[in-house]
Image (tube, grey):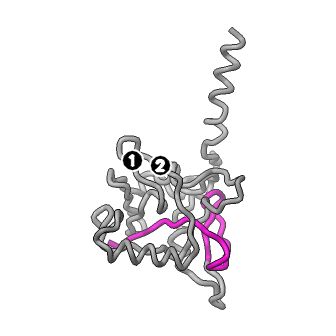
């Protein structure tokens, strides 16, 4: 019996260790009621009026599971801009008019920061809205948990990125690191 209980605990332990960590003494800054969840892989932010893809580029929205699946892709900033252009202009692109939206774009850093659930980390974003979008840990040295913005630093030499694990902002060289892309629409 002890072996069965130990086996069960060991099997469930990774699931618990990967759960979003939230402070219970803080009110929610990005609660579920803020969003309108669509089955097509988008969500509407009632506060900002923006529509977000729930999965970063490279991952696929699975309606039946209400989650993102796949490896995800990290790209340099210029490639991210090219990807957005292809999505918007190429009718043969798989994400062309995704979710019924004609124009997608990289978010600015303020829009990304607005997604922050200040009392939570791993991820620092709403757990229902973006639960399977980004990894909770990036021990492999990848930048999968970081998201490109369209906002340059004051001198224009770097682009601000958003850390989805801790909700922090970091300037990065546009061609220095391959980073995840999450798109937004004004429609």
Q: Residue furthest front?
A: 92
Q: Residue at x 57, y 53 (%)?
A: 27
Judge whether residue 36 is colored magenta: no
* Residue shown at the point (42%, 66%) measured from the top left: 47
Residue at image point 45% right, 51% down? 32
* Residue 164 seen: yes
Q: Which callout, 1 or 2, points at the residue further toward the start of the chain?
A: 1
Crowd band around label 2 with a 10 angstrom C-alpha radius: few (<14), some (14–19), many (20+): some
Image-quadrant location for residue 42: bottom left
Q: Position of residue 62 (x, y in %)?
A: 39, 47
Q: Secondary structure at mark 2?
A: strand
Magenta region, residue range? 160-187
Displayed quadrant of residue 154: bottom right
Distance between mark 1 and mark 2 Cα atoms = 7 Å
Q: Is residue 136 above or below residue 90?
A: above
Q: Secondary structure at mark 1?
A: strand
Q: Residue 22 placed where, x, y %?
A: 63, 48
Which quarter shows the N terminus?
top right
Residue drawn at point x = 66 percent, y = 14 percent: 4
- List x then y, in percent, for residue 167: 63, 62
Instruction: Residue 89 in the image: state x and y as whole percent.
Output: 33, 77
Residue identified by numbered label 2: 69
Q: Main secondary structure of the magenta part?
A: loop
Which of 178 and 31 lies nearest the eye of the viewer? 178
Category of crowding for the residue at label 1, using alpha-carbon neighbours closer than 10 angstroms: few (below 14), some (14–19), many (at least 20): some
Q: In the figure, residue 146 lies in which quadrant? A: bottom right
Residue 26 in view of the camera:
no
* Residue with the most extreme top position: 1
Q: Are marks 1 and 2 in contact (CB under 8 Å)?
A: yes
Which disc is residue 62 wearing?
1
């Amino acid at each position: 019996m002890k072996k069965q209980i130990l086996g069960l605990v060991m099997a469930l332990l990774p699931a618990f260790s990967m759960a979003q960590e939230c402070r219970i003494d803080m009110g929610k800054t990005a609660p579920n009621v803020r969003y309108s969840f669509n089955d097509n892989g988008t969500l509407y932010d009632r506060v900002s009026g923006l529509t977000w893809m729930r999965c970063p580029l490279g991952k696929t929205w699975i309606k039946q599971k209400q989650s993102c699946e796949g490896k995800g892709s990290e790209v340099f900033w210029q490639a991210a801009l090219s990807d957005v252009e292809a999505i918007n202009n190429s009718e043969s692109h798989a994400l062309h008019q995704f979710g019924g939206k004609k124009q997608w774009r990289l978010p600015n850093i303020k829009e990304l920061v607005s997604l922050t659930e200040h009392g939570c980390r791993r991820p620092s974003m709403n757990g229902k809205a973006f639960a399977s979008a980004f990894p909770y840990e990036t021990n492999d040295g990848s930048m999968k948990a970081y998201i490109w913005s369209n906002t340059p630093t004051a001198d224009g030499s770097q682009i601000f990125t958003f850390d989805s694990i801790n909700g922090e902002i970091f300037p990065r060289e546009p061609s220095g690191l391959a980073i995840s892309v999450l798109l937004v629409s004004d429609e």
